[in-house]
Image (spheres, rainbow, N blue to C red):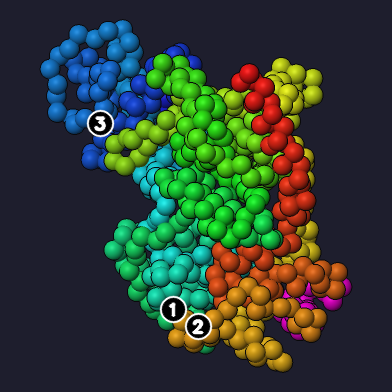
Amino acid sequence: MRRACIRLRLFVRCAIRSIIFSVVNHIFGLLGYMKRLLCLLCILSIVAISATAQTVKPIRNSAAFDPFKLIPGSSFSASSSTPQKPVNRTPEETERAKTIGDFSEALDIIRENYAGGQTSVNNLTKSSIQGALRSLDPHSNYFDPSEYQTLLEEQQSEYSGIGATIVNFEKDGILDTFVLSTTPGSPAQKAGLRFGDRIISVDGDWVGGESSDVVRDKVRGGDGSTVRIIVERSATMRRDLIAIKRSLVSEPSVPDYYILRPGIGYIDLTEGFNLTTADEVGAALKALHRQGMTSLVLDLRGNPGGILEQAIKVAEKFLPAGSVIVSQHGRMRIDNRVWKSANNSPETIPVVLLVDDGTASASEVVAGALQDYDRAYIIGERTFGKGLVQDVINLPFGSGLTLTAARYYTPSGRCIQRDYSNGDIYDYFRHRYEMPDTEKVKFEARTITNRKVFGGDGIMPDEIINDPEMNATEVALLDPLFFFSTDLINGRVKGFESYKIDPGPASGKQFSTGDFAAPDGLVDAFRSYAVKAYPGRISDKMVNTEAQFVKLRLRYNLVTAALGSVPAEQILIQDDAQVAKAVDDLPRAQQLAIGALKARLVRKK
């Protein structure tokens, strides 16, 4: 027996990282879909117990107890370690209890024998659960309490924090986090944070070299709590310790809308679908109609999805009553649903829809419905291709998981989910695989005017217009452009002192996006600064070659400093090739809508 234990310990030391995954994969390979879910919940129970006990004791031989029994229709919660009365188990329940014992014992062996550093039951269990879920599909996932809280906040129209947009920039080989803008009325604005302020530390933790995502997570916290930040002021270069009381900060899913050109409205719907999206889109449409809108560019680029019901309500605004918007089919009868429009007075103006490879999930529901009914002309790039629907499941101690429960289908019957059978998550999310033309025939469908469309690989735009990425020179210029702009707004650029922007409303000066220009003289001043501040990285030739890009980014930075990041996006939109093409294609959208109306009338006869 002793020799066997020694052999086991040696084996653990040599192959420690494979134990959890081999156990879980073996178990999950044996169980069916519902058994997998039950097993996951059982494993999660071990996490809950580990939060209140020093060790997790194996229960393989505890046949008399069943602390994790799930009754159909009941909610799941972590049970205590209080002994239960003996129960008669079914074979499935016995197998489940054995699974828990195997997993618990593996964790104990790892914690007692692993020599590679500290082990955490929570981390090991989280990795195991995520590995098991990844064997199902790329979108089922487990979230620890902090990640789950972030997921839930994304479904709201607000979050708890200070209301500052922060970004990373590098100078002299050092990566730091800087304030780009603040939300009007937010704690950050009231504390005087402004464009170019450098964040040194958060609650005593030095954040130099950290990514802005890490700093963001440190700055965010519970409503009413206080965060202490050391900031280096861009105006004075003085370091201040400031205490900011966190509060709920508005984060609308429609950050901006405006008249792009006379009669042409633009709605920015790039932030996802949360609980208020449909109302926000409705308010934007009403406001734009009051301003004379007769056609619309609806921007869904980069929209990652969100709440399906909200996407359905947005599509409903453009589709007449009785139109199927999306259908959903799952294993359970409750997951089989069909959503139809109930709108008796939908929008009739021409619509061009902008999409790209970041347009995913719920936003693809909108794109698919409007395309199938020929209600919008779609331009841009192929969408992501996510046609799986996840249930969000609350778990003990604030954690949670998303589990695929169904697939959704566009009105023409398309499921736009991309293939993930090769199991390579990296290739899947990087779009390394594209469906061959010979396979597309299997997913062919027809729009209301009998145009060919295809499923199985996202939504293909009616017209492909690629968004050119920044080249290497443009990327290299971003850092010096930011630091030059910081000097510019603080009156430190000789000959351009009039560009100084006084902080806060106390200055009494009102700005608009048209107040800032970037004349050739300003580009010359930037060239001199960049070549000197970034020797060997920036040259005169680089600035001369990208002079128009420099002008655009200088304007963007100035508007950001004066008005905030949302109005500043209007500067970039003015130079957006896809938006320009959308404006040109509005007559095509009108022709498509007229053809769809005629086809609908013919069907009614």
Residue designated by label 2: 503
Quick check: can you spot residue 51? yes
Q: Tell me if label 1 and label 3 are in contact, CB under 8 Å.
A: no
Q: Residues within 10 Å of mark 3 (few under 14, many from 20)?
A: some
Image coordinates for residue 449, horizontal then vertical, percent: 72, 26
Image coordinates for residue 178, horizontal then vertical, percent: 54, 70
Q: Secondary structure at mark 3?
A: loop
Q: Is residue 215 left or right of residue 88?
A: right
Q: Nearer the viewer, residue 250 or 412?
A: 412
Residue designated by label 3: 77
Q: Is residue 232 above or below residue 401?
A: below
Residue designated by label 1: 192
Residue type, mark 2 in image: Pro
Alpha carbons under labels 3 and 2: distance apart: 51 Å
Q: Residues within 10 Å of mark 2 (few under 14, many from 20)?
A: some
Q: Residues within 10 Å of mark 1 (few under 14, many from 20)?
A: few
Alpha carbons under labels 1 and 2: distance apart: 8 Å
Q: Is residue 465 left or right of residue 496?
A: right
First along the sequence among labels 1 and 2: 1
Q: Tell me if label 3 and label 2 are in contact, CB under 8 Å.
A: no
The residue positioned 34% from the left and 31% from the top of the image is 44
Q: Nearer the viewer, residue 221 or 297?
A: 297
Q: Is residue 318 above or below residue 174?
A: above
Is residue 385 found inside the magenta-colored segment of the image?
Answer: no
First along the sequence among labels 1 and 3: 3
For the magenta stretch, what is the residue range?
Answer: 523-541
Is residue 530 found inside the magenta-colored segment of the image?
Answer: yes
Q: Secondary structure at mark 1?
A: loop
Image coordinates for residue 189, horizontal then vertical, percent: 43, 73
First along the sequence among labels 3 and 2: 3
